[in-house]
């Protein structure tokens, strides 16, 4: 509570400081200016009419799309943009956002116009490497998972447990090394497992941006790999009732999805409501069914914006997301004998006829989010205060016997409170910047009744952070720098395997910094380079995890001791930092981007180097025999890791009807302490998209696209120890890991594969049509980063039809 009081006191002081520092302009000294573009071609539009609603005051854009209305007496007003052949757009304009970018949609285009304001969905560092999807690109993948949506960017891949559990990977890092900022809040969930995907519905988001640099300075610890920024739809004032209703059907899994979005805005208020429902049955490969891979998702959200004064905005958001996910039944095995049978089977074990029933193994997750944000903007500065509350409930069901079948073996509830204060100070000559403070409190509890030793203990944590970012802009050059410090304390309480109680207080504190440079080489080329440090405290799961999770036995850094004289380990004693110090991960990432943009061509090349000290990972330690049989076990350890690579994206507008996009990514990574490789790294990927915009009779718009990609066979391989060799070693009393503890895999990497997808989008007045065929040639393949690859192929052909009605 002391941290809350300190933040509230600081916010009060800063708020009244704004009143003292603010320099009010003359009575009629406000202005509105910006540039108007074509949403489809991104070309500036000349002679667009810009009118202040309810008046005769207005102007028209010049040959570069620029407009300016000055000498305005009111602080805010509604601007109406109209142009023959384009949809009219109404934008509520405030004096503190004098410059805006307006994207008008042609009448035949299925999308509405877009307004871009400087602070929306921004990383706040112009030297950082970031990318965002267009409205059309986002609409094409909105029925997929968040991980699949993020993988549309070069350098972003996925790691998955089947098609339902998909997590994004940025430059080889994932899980708790990637931050997800959901509608301005850090998305807090059980992010320590590769089987735990973010509980966010892509069909209800409006914008997504990926920051590939070390972004700890702005967003807090854990962002060693990068940040994914997600925004809900913007709430527009003075807007008539608008929205959309969509239905989507998919052949693979025989799924159905319905989505409804509504929004209405008045002079000083705006409201939004949206919801989505998905039901999916068992998926299938080109040759067989994947039993128990169904899915049920329910999500809804509501938002209210209040604009009582021109200087003040208040936003209130609520969202609810619930899902039940089946995991392939044939992928869960109790011991090495069962695993060997599963690996040798042409069709996964326990395969049955198609159905919608979801049985163990499965997950049931519910996530609720509430956010309240107040924003004050003066003439030269702004202050925002944001409070967030999140509750994440996760249940994991394993294959158990008797009456325990429907009892979860993991049942966790995570409560998170956060307070964010951000002050954008007045410009001091060429110097512009911001200062901020963040506080996060978390309470994680095991819900009783699982009849198991908790996999992770209960804990409470408090983290307080301060940051400072400054930039100097000089004609074609921008210099940026930032500092941050965070202090984190966690109180842990749990039970050992003999049911004894243990307690511990864990304290970590560290600083992070960034320095960057942006150079506008000429009107076509821009160069960005950024060097940043990032850090991450070991999470409770990495320290204390104990027992079986999915198909493997795992022991955290403080849950095992190595007994060298017996060539074995003991898991009876709970260690502390005095017994085994576990320093925080420290990352040093340098990333540079060269971007070239011409009227019909755009290319972006990004290179990066990421060195991580004290990198936490799991490694094999031996074989053990339990009541379920013999199985390998893994222990957590630390090392130093080096990752480097590059991403390439190029877009070419061949003509008014033909366009294409090429993207590629390359990653190299190494455990440089043990001279070892890591398992599960994304392989080299090349992709090519070809699009054609046709004029078909009866359609206002028609767009055909062919997506081609080739996923190479991984080249940085670990040693292979087949299951039968593990069993043979156990029978002969041979410890395969006593002298060689290097990472191993039970199967060699799968071969490379080629995929083709096809899509057709069209519009008839207010009805939008989207027809897709994924895996066009029904190719059998196994992604290297999918844990189900040991037991089954990935999805076969999937035909998708989506109908959307614009309200």
Image (spheres, helix red, strand yellow):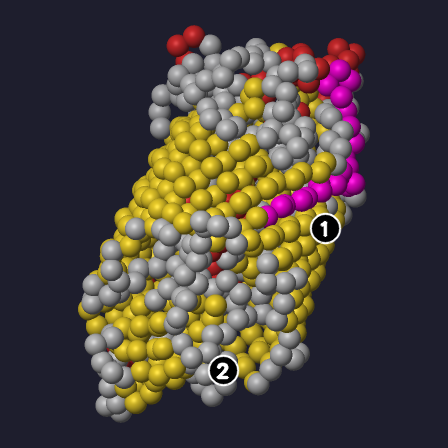
Asked if 531 appears above or below 230 in the picture, the reply is below
Between 485 and 806, which is closer to the camera in this rendering? 806
- x then y, percent, for residue 286: 63, 24
Whether residue 532 appears in magenta in the rendering, the answer is no
Asked if 42 appears above or below 285 in the picture, the reply is below
Query: Circle 2: is it few (<14), some (14-19), or many (20+) Cα within 10 Å?
Result: few
Give me the residue at 29% from left, 70% from top: 92
Can see residue 446?
A: yes
| Relative to 175, 337 lies left or right | right
Give me the residue at 60% from left, 28% from top: 796
- x then y, percent, for residue 76: 26, 76
Quadrant in the rendering for residue 533: bottom right
SS of the residue at dot 1? strand
Asked if 19 appears above or below 161 in the picture, the reply is below
Residue occupied by mark 1: 666
Q: Give the mark nearest the N terminus, 2 or 1.
A: 2
Which region is colored magenta?
A: 705-725
Quadrant in the rendering for residue 559: top right
Between 116 and 666, which is closer to the camera in this rendering? 116
Residue occupied by mark 2: 63
Q: Residue furthest front?
A: 697
Between 178 and 56, which is closer to the camera in this rendering? 56
- Count of numbered marks: 2
| Relative to 475, 110 lies left or right | left
């Amino acid at each position: 509570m002391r941290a809350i009081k300190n933040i509230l006191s600081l916010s009060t002081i800063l708020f009244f400081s704004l009143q003292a520092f603010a320099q009010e302009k003359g009575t009629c000294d406000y202005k509105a200016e910006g540039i108007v573009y074509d949403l489809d071609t991104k070309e500036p539009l000349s002679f667009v009419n810009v009118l202040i609603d309810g008046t005769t005051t207005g102007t028209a854009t010049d040959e570069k799309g620029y407009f300016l209305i000055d000498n305005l007496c009111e602080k805010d007003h509604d601007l109406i943009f109209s142009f023959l052949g384009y949809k009219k757009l109404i934008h509520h304009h405030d004096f503190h956002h004098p410059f805006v970018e307006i994207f008008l949609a042609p009448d035949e285009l299925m999308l509405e116009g877009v307004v871009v304001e400087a602070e929306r969905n921004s990383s706040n560092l112009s030297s950082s490497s970031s990318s965002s999807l267009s409205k059309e690109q986002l609409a094409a993948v909105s029925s997929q998972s968040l991980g699949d949506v993020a993988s549309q960017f070069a350098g972003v891949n996925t790691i998955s447990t089947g098609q339902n559990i998909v997590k994004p990977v940025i430059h080889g890092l994932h899980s708790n090394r990637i931050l997800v900022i959901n509608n301005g809040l850090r998305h807090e969930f059980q992010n320590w497992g590769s089987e735990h995907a973010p509980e966010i519905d892509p069909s209800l988001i409006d914008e997504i941006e990926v920051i590939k640099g070390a972004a700890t300075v702005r967003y807090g610890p854990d962002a060693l790999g990068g940040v994914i920024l997600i925004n809900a739809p913007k709430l527009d004032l003075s807007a008539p009732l608008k929205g959309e209703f969509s239905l989507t059907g998919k052949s693979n899994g025989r799924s159905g999805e319905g989505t409804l979005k509504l929004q209405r805005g008045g002079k000083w208020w705006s409201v939004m409501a949206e919801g989505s429902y998905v039901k999916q049955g068992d998926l299938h490969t080109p040759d067989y069914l994947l039993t128990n891979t169904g899915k049920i998702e329910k999500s809804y959200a509501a938002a209210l914006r209040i604009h009582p004064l021109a200087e003040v905005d208040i936003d209130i958001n609520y969202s609810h997301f619930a899902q039940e996910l089946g995991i392939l039944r044939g992928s869960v095995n109790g011991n090495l004998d069962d695993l060997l049978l599963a690996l040798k089977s042409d069709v996964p074990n326990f395969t049955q006829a198609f159905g919608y029933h979801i049985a163990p193994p499965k997950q049931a997750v519910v996530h609720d989010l509430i956010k309240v944000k107040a924003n004050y903007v003066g003439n030269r500065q702004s202050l925002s205060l944001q409070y967030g509350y999140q509750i994440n409930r996760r249940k994991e069901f394993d294959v158990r016997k008797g009456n325990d079948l429907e009892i979860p073996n993991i049942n966790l509830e995570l409560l998170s409170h956060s307070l964010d204060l951000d002050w954008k100070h007045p410009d001091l000559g060429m110097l512009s910047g911001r200062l901020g403070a963040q506080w996060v409190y978390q309470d994680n509890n095991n819900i009783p009744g699982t009849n198991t030793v908790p996999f992770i203990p209960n804990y409470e944590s408090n983290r307080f952070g301060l940051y400072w970012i400054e930039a100097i802009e000089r004609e074609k050059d921008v210099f940026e720098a930032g500092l941050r410090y965070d202090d984190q304390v966690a109180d842990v309480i749990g039970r050992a395997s003999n049911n004894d109680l243990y307690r511990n207080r864990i304290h970590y504190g560290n600083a992070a910094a960034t320095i960057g440079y942006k150079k506008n080489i000429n009107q076509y080329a821009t160069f960005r380079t950024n060097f940043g440090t990032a850090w991450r405290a070991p999470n409770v799961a990495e320290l204390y995890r104990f027992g079986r999770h999915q198909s493997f036995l795992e022991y955290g850094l403080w849950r095992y001791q190595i007994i060298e004289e017996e060539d074995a380990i003991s898991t009876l004693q709970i260690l502390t930092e005095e017994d085994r110090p576990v320093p925080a991960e420290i990352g040093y990432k340098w990333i540079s981007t060269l971007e070239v943009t011409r009227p019909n061509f755009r290319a972006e090349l990004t290179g990066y180097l990421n060195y991580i000290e004290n990198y936490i990972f799991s490694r094999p330690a031996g074989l053990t025999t339990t009541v379920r049989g013999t199985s390998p076990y893994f222990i957590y350890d630390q090392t130093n890791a080096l990752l480097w690579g590059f991403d390439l994206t190029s877009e070419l507008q061949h003509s008014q009807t033909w366009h294409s996009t090429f993207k590629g990514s390359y990653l190299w990574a190494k455990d440089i302490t043990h001279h070892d490789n890591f398992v599960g790294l994304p392989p080299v990927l090349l992709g090519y998209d070809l699009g054609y915009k046709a004029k078909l009779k009866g359609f206002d718009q028609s767009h055909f696209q062919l997506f081609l990609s080739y996923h190479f066979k991984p080249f940085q391989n670990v040693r292979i120890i087949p299951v039968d060799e593990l069993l043979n070693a156990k029978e002969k009393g041979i410890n395969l890991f006593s002298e060689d503890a290097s990472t191993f895999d039970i199967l060699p990497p799968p071969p490379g594969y080629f995929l083709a997808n096809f899509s057709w989008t069209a519009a008839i007045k207010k009805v939008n049509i989207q027809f897709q065929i994924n895996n066009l040639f029904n190719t059998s393949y196994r992604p290297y980063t999918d844990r189900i690859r040991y037991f089954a192929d990935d999805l076969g052909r999937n035909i998708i039809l989506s109908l959307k009605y614009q309200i």
